[in-house]
Amino acid sequence: MKNHKRAWAGINLSGLEKNINTIKNSLSGTTEIMAVVKADAYGHGETEVVNKLCSMGIKYFAVSSLDEAINVRNITSDGEILILGYTPPEYADELIKYNIIQCIVSEEHAAELSRNAVSPVRCHIKLDTGMGRIGLKFRTVSECADCAQRITELENISAEGLFTHFAVADCDDDENIRYTENQADFIKSVYNELAGRGIKLRHVHFLNSAGAGYHFDEASTLARIGITMYGLYPNYPLPLPYEICPVMEFKAVISYVKTVESGDCISYGRTYTADGERKIATITVGYADGYSRLLSSRGQVLYKGKRCSIVGRVCMDQTMIDVTGTDAAPGDTVTLIGRDGDDEITADELASWYGTIGYEVVCGISKRVPRIYR
Ligand SMILES: *Cc1c(COP(=O)(O)O)cnc(C)c1O
């Protein structure tokens, strides 16, 4: 680590543990956490995150694809793993081999999976109750239940659950609150209709992080928790009813320091020209590390607890910052995401500077940035 200090992401696994405990305490009834570890655990590192969660007794995991599911299966032999998205029906045998639960995206998908399988594939049926992405989409509860029932009757489909995804659970205006409630009401009605027909599915779930935080409902047997477990907000800066701490920090070092004079230009495109004497530092991070080029002349970093502005364009591997008034020197560490002294830059705040969300920032920290666990 010392020899290769360039840009790195520190992952605070005890922060993850704290967040999980906070979220767990906020759930009541029998609702259990399903930890969403897709996209390399939102960039935090699937192996270490899943190991940590297993050690805490988490039993349910959600991923986005078969490849991710197999990776998680290789970490935990007894965890329940749900693929949230599409898997081509020709992989039915792999789903069975690795004991993975597949999301049914449509009736045709279920029929094809059943046809391709040699024994029952474990499934959760997805309903599109307003997200408009995947799942059975019907205007009435009874039509939707009819379709779900046909799926449960397929020879090689073992339906164990019904789920849906909220579109606006992170919004606090009345119209969106009503929209979310309607989504929850619809899936609960379909579930109860099926139960009335003698089809008792083990799981029905519709809570994501925002749902669990703002619309908790113990009728949801699972809460699919992603972003809040990593200490970020579903809709920054809208507060959550509990406190969470960011799990990832992102650091780089100063490689070079110089004093520029009025008229001197910095970086590609000469988009920054000094209007007087400034002290400029070069830091060892760029867009190939997932430090977006959209932060050019827009972002800030922390140096010894003080905010320093990015000047000129972010390059592939290097970026320049204004450190005027500091004693910045080559070899010093700068904080791109994280706490330094009395100040903190979160992935959520950094995202807000260029019009995206914390989710995209942490998922986007690239492979070449080593994750350091503590
Ligand atoms: C990604 C995802 C989640 C987790 O969402 P967060 O907002 O990170 O909690 C839950 N459910 C589905 C279907 C998802 O795709």
Image (cartoon, grey):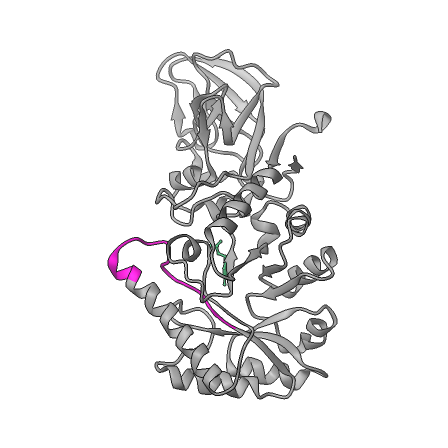
Q: Quadrant of residue 158?
A: bottom right
> Is residue 325 rendered magenta in the image?
no
Region in magenta: 162-177
Taking depth in this image into account, of 80 and 276 the one nearest to the observer is 80
The answer to whether 291 appears left or right of 49 in the picture is left
Residue beneath the point at 50% across and 43% down: 231
Q: Residue furthest front?
A: 29
Residue 93 in sight in this render: yes
Taking depth in this image into account, of 181 and 116 the one nearest to the observer is 181
Residue 285 in sight in this render: no
Residue beneath the point at 45% across and 67% down: 219
Residue 85: x %, y % from top left: 55, 67
Residue 295: x %, y % from top left: 44, 36
Q: Quadrant of residue 5?
A: top right
Residue beneath the point at 35% across and 81% down: 139
| Residue 329 position (above or below residue 195) | above
| Residue 38 position (above or below residue 85) | above
| Residue 151 position (above or below residue 58) | below
> Is residue 173 rendered magenta in the image?
yes
Residue beneath the point at 49% across and 34% down: 314
Q: Quadrant of the N terminus?
A: top right
Q: Quadrant of the C terminus?
A: top right
Q: Quadrant of residue 271?
A: top left
Taking depth in this image into account, of 327 and 148 the one nearest to the observer is 148
Residue 168: x %, y % from top left: 36, 59
Residue 122: x %, y % from top left: 63, 75
Instruction: Give the number of marks.
Output: 0
